[in-house]
Image (cartoon, rainbow, N blue to C red):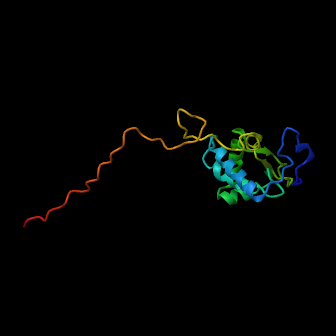
């Protein structure tokens, strides 16, 4: 299986198919992908596996890669059977897309960043999540410190009571 993007994988509705990202852009995309994963219900151990897959993306293969199950198992320090169990779970919740290779033929699985994430990353949001900490009167706006009308008076911590020498 060729590591280059195949003609059947290029679709006009996927503006990222022919993009060449710089190292910095790939790093930003990896960071945004992990940030995006926090909005999903990724099972225990799934983040480690997705991180190992993400590390295999490179200059030539920016959105897909072909690591073997054995490589991924060694990378996350788990048994290959654990990886075999986890990949379908991750695929089912939509955090990775997998094109399964022929078993025993030497054709590796093809792991691709999910279309939903790539549309989010290359779309108008540019992969930026709305802030979780917004002022209630401006839900989409940035967060600024709120000034309280009444000052908060902090009490001085009195500390522990002093011990007096015991009389003998």
Residue at the top extreme, as displayed? 137
Residue found at x 68% / y 46%: 86
142 relative to 54, above or below: above
Give the quarter of the image for residue 114: top right
Is 33 left, or right, of 5 in this rendering?
A: left
Residue at point 85%, 46% (across, down): 17
Left or right side of 149 for 42? right
Query: In what quadrant of the picture does the C terminus appear?
Result: bottom left
Q: Indicate the position of residue 157 as horizontal and vertical percent values.
A: 29, 53
Total marks placed: 0
Query: Percent x, y for residue 76?
Result: 66, 57
Residue 81 visible in the displayed image: no
Residue at horizontal 14%, vertical 62%?
164
**Looking at the picture, how far across and down is residue 26, in whole percent?**
75, 54
Residue 50, percent from left and from top = 69, 50
Looking at the image, residue 157 lies above or below residue 117: below
| Residue sitting nearer the eye, 63 or 157 | 157
- At a point 86% along the width and 53% down the height, the residue shown is 105
Between 99 and 160, the one nearer to me in the picture: 160
């Amino acid at each position: 299986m060729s590591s280059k993007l195949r003609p059947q994988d290029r679709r006009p509705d996927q503006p990222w198919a022919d993009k060449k990202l710089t190292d910095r852009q790939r790093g930003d995309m990896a960071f945004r992908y992990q940030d995006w994963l926090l909005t999903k219900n990724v099972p225990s151990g799934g983040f480690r596996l997705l991180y190992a897959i993400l590390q295999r993306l490179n200059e030539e293969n920016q959105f897909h890669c072909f690591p073997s199950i054995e490589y991924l198992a060694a990378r996350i320090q788990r048994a290959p059977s654990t990886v075999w169990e986890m990949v379908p779970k991750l695929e089912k919740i939509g955090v990775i897309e997998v094109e399964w290779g022929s078993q025993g033929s030497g054709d590796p699985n093809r792991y691709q960043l999910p279309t939903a994430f790539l549309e989010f990353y290359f779309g108008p949001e540019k992969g930026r999540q709305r802030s979780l900490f917004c002022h209630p009167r401006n839900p989409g706006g940035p967060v600024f410190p709120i000034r309280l009308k009444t000052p908060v008076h902090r009490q001085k911590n009195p500390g522990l009571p002093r011990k007096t020498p015991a009389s003998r």
